[in-house]
Image: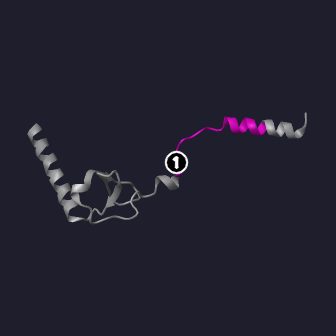
């Protein structure tokens, strides 16, 4: 056999034995979702809120709007802080009633 053919077969055997992975590269996993935030998002246009906390990023709040756009909201916005306080209080009251 020719040396090139043997080398090609060996290379193909190594490639076929290599594990296949669907994991994302670390650089994509560690990126923050919100690169910039909005402070003035009308509350009436928000359909749902998502709160993300990743190890390398500060708290991120993503609002899905009624027009299906997603925007990042500044977590220091006063109405958002009040919303979170009300939600936490509501959860505490619900837990007290269950006990």
Q: Residue at x 84, y 36 (%)?
A: 6
Which quarter of the picture shows residue 73? bottom left
- Secondary structure of the residue carrying numbered label 1: loop
Q: The magenta stretch spans which residues?
A: 10-25
In this rendering, does residue 99 appear at all?
no
In the rendered view, tell whether residue 13 sits above or below residue 74: above
Q: Residue furthest top?
A: 1
The answer, for residue 83, to whether it is visible in the render is yes
Q: Is residue 19 left or right of residue 59?
A: right
Residue 67 at x, y percent in the picture: 32, 52
Q: In terms of image quadrants, where is residue 58?
A: bottom left
Is 35 part of what is drawn in magenta? Answer: no
Q: Quadrant of the N terminus?
A: top right
- Tell me what residue is drawn at x 22 percent, y 58 percent: 43
- 2 up-or-down from 28: above or below: above
| Residue that sits furthest to the left in the current view | 97
Question: Is 88 positioned to the left or the right of 54 in the image?
Answer: left
Q: Residues within 10 Å of mark 1 (few under 14, many from 20)?
A: few
Q: What residue is shown at x 12% (from left), y 42% (from top)?
A: 94
Instruction: Identify residue for label 1.
Output: 24
Q: Position of residue 77 (x, y in %)?
A: 24, 65
Taking the spot 34% from the left edge, 59% from the top edge, the residue there is: 72
Instruction: Please say if 77 is above or below 45.
Output: below
Q: Is residue 17 magenta?
A: yes
The quadrant of the picture occupied by the C terminus is: top left
């Amino acid at each position: 056999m020719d040396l090139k053919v043997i080398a090609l077969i060996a290379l193909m055997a190594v490639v076929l034995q290599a594990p296949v992975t669907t994991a994302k590269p670390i650089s994509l996993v560690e990126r923050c979702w919100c690169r910039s935030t909005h402070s003035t998002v009308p509350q009436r246009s928000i359909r749902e809120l998502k709160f993300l906390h990743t190890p390398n990023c500060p708290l991120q709040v993503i609002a899905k709007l009624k027009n299906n756009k997603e925007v990042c909201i500044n977590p220091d916005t006063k109405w958002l802080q009040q919303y979170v306080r009300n939600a936490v209080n509501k959860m505490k009251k619900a837990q007290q009633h269950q006990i």
